[in-house]
C-alpha cells in the first residue's frame, strides 16, 4: 500500500547563512554527525573509518559530473542558457560523449521564450580562439515549456565530451546563489569520479580523500563502486502536499556482475555512500522481481516497493539478476530506477549511510526519515544547534539504519 505522507511534516527552518556556499579548504575537515539508535554525537570526517563496522562492504557512486551548462546568444543579442540533462541521440551516454560533429540532448532551456527557430551560436565573451574554432551551435528540435531536445553541432574532429569540457560550466546547485567558479571544477567532483554522466554531484562523496579511503581499506572494509548518473530532478521541489501525487525522476545506473554476486551472498554490514548509492542498491530487489516475473531486469518503478507485500528473499531477487547476466554473457546490469523512498519503505540491503544534510521538504529528507525510522528531526535539530554546514558543500553524517 502506498503510504500517505504529507511533505509539510518534513519541514525545518534553514537560514541562508547555514548553507555552505563554498567547500572547506580540506575535503575531510568537515564535521561528521554520528547517529545510532537515537543517539547523536559528532566527530571530524577524516576519522570516519573509526566508526565503520569492521568487515563491512562499502559502496560508492563513481559517476562524474559533466560541465553540462552551456551559454548561447541569438543574433538579437538575447542570451539563452542550455542545461544538458540526458542524451537523446545517440541515447547512450558513452556514445553521445564520443559523438563527433553532431548529437542531441534533452535539455532545460533558460530564457526559452526568447528562442524561436533560429540557430544559436555559443557565447564566447573572452574570444577564446580554440572555442571559436569549434563553431559550436544549437538548434531546437522540440520544446515543451522550459525543456526540449536540442541538437548540437560543431567543427573539428573532437568528441562531444571535449566540447563540453572546453565550452561548458559545472552546474552547481541553484541554492548556492552564485555562478560556478574555478574551485567548483575540482571540488564539485568526488576524487574517485570516473564515468561521465551526472549533472549534479553525489555530494556525500565530496568529503573523501585518498587518506580516508586508505584508512577504510586498512580496516578490512571491502570498497565497491556502482554508477548512478544524478539528474537535475534531484533539485526539483515537491510541489504537492500528498507525496502520492509527486512524480519521481528516473535515473540510469549500472552495477557490475561481480558486485551483484557479492551482494547476493553478503551477510555483514553494508555501508552506502550517499542517497544515490542507497537508491541504486535498494532498487536491485525490485529489478530482480521484474527479472523473475518478466524475464528481463526492467527498471524499478516509483511505487513498486509499496504496491504489495514482497516476501521473496533478497538473495533470490539479486540472484535472478545474476542468472540473467550470466545467461546473456553480460558483465554488468545496465538499467534505471524511479523508486521513491519514503517512511514505511523496507530497506533490504543498506545498514549504514553516509550523507550530507538535505533541503527541507525534499524527497531526500523523506529517504533519511525512512532510513532512521522517522527520527530525522533528532539528527537535524542537533546539526542546526551545533553549527553544522548544510547542503552540497556542507558537513556530513554517518547514520545507522532502522530496518523494518
Image: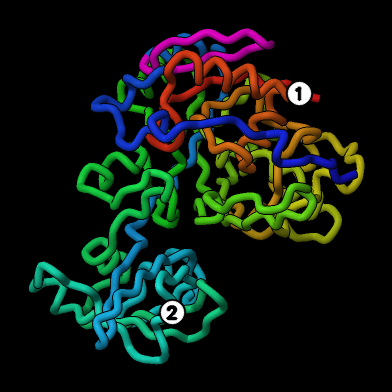
Count of numbered tags = 2
Which of the 4 image quarters holds residue 111? bottom left
Q: Residue at x 47, y 64 (%)?
A: 85
Residue holding disc 2? 150
Callout in the foreground (1, 2): 2
Q: Nearer the viewer, residue 132 or 283?
A: 132
Q: Of helix, strand and loop, which one carries label 2?
A: strand
Q: Position of residue 204 (x, y in %)?
A: 46, 33
* Residue 318 visible from this viewpoint: no
Quarter placement of the N terminus? top right
Q: Nearer the viewer, residue 215 or 145?
A: 145
What range is drawn magenta here? 32-46
Residue holding disc 1? 403
Vertical placement of residue 291 versus 26, above or below: below
Q: Position of residue 382 (x, y in %)?
A: 55, 15
Tell which circle, 1 or 2, labels the residue nearer the N-terminal end.
Answer: 2
* Residue 243 located within the stretch drawn in magenta: no
Vertical placement of residue 360 versus 294, above or below: above
Amino acid at each position: 500500500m502506498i503510504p500517505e505522507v504529507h511533505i509539510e511534516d518534513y519541514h525545518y527552518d534553514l537560514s541562508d547563512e547555514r548553507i555552505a556556499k563554498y567547500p572547506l579548504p580540506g575535503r575531510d575537515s568537515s564535521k561528521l554527525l554520528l547517529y545510532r539508535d537515537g543517539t547523536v554525537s559528532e566527530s571530524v570526517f577524516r576519522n570516519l573509518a573509526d566508526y565503520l563496522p569492521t568487515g563491512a562492504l562499502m559502496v560508492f557512486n563513481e559517476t562524474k559530473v559533466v560541465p553540462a551548462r552551456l551559454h548561447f546568444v541569438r543574433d538579437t543579442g538575447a542570451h539563452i542558457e542550455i542545461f544538458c540533462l540526458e542524451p537523446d541521440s545517440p541515447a547512450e551516454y558513452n556514445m553521445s560523449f564520443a559523438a563527433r560533429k553532431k548529437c542531441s540532448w534533452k535539455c532545460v532551456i533558460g530564457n526559452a521564450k526568447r528562442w524561436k527557430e533560429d540557430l544559436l551560436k555559443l557565447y564566447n565573451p573572452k574570444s577564446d580562439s580554440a572555442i571559436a574554432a569549434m563553431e559550436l551551435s544549437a538548434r531546437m528540435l522540440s520544446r515543451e515549456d522550459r525543456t526540449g531536445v536540442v541538437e548540437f553541432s560543431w567543427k573539428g574532429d573532437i568528441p562531444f565530451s571535449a566540447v563540453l569540457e572546453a565550452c561548458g560550466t559545472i552546474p552547481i546547485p541553484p541554492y548556492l546563489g552564485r555562478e560556478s567558479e574555478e574551485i567548483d571544477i575540482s571540488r564539485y567532483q568526488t576524487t574517485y569520479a570516473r564515468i561521465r554522466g551526472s549533472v549534479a554531484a553525489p555530494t556525500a562523496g565530496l568529503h573523501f580523500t585518498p587518506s580516508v579511503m586508505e584508512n577504510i581499506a586498512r580496516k578490512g572494509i571491502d570498497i565497491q563502486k556502482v554508477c548512478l548518473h544524478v539528474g537535475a530532478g534531484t533539485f526539483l521541489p515537491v510541489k504537492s502536499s500528498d507525496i502520492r501525487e509527486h512524480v519521481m525522476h528516473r535515473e540510469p545506473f549500472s552495477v557490475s556482475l561481480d558486485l551483484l554476486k557479492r551482494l547476493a551472498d553478503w551477510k555483514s554490514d553494508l555501508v552506502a555512500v550517499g542517497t544515490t548509492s542507497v537508491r541504486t542498491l535498494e532498487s536491485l530487489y525490485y529489478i530482480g522481481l521484474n527479472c523473475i516475473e518478466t524475464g528481463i531486469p526492467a527498471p524499478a518503478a516509483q511505487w513498486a516497493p509499496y504496491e504489495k507485500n514482497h516476501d521473496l528473499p533478497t538473495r533470490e531477487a539479486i540472484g535472478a539478476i545474476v542468472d540473467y547476466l550470466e545467461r546473456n554473457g553480460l558483465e554488468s546490469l545496465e538499467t534505471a530506477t524511479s523508486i521513491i523512498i519514503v517512511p514505511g519503505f523496507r530497506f533490504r540491503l543498506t545498514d549504514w549511510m553516509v550523507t550530507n544534510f538535505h533541503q527541507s521538504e525534499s524527497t531526500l529528507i523523506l529517504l533519511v526519515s525512512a532510513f532512521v525510522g522517522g527520527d530525522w528531526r533528532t539528527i537535524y535539530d542537533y546539526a542546526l544547534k551545533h553549527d553544522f554546514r548544510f547542503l552540497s558543500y556542507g558537513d556530513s553524517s554517518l547514520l545507522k539504519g532502522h530496518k523494518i
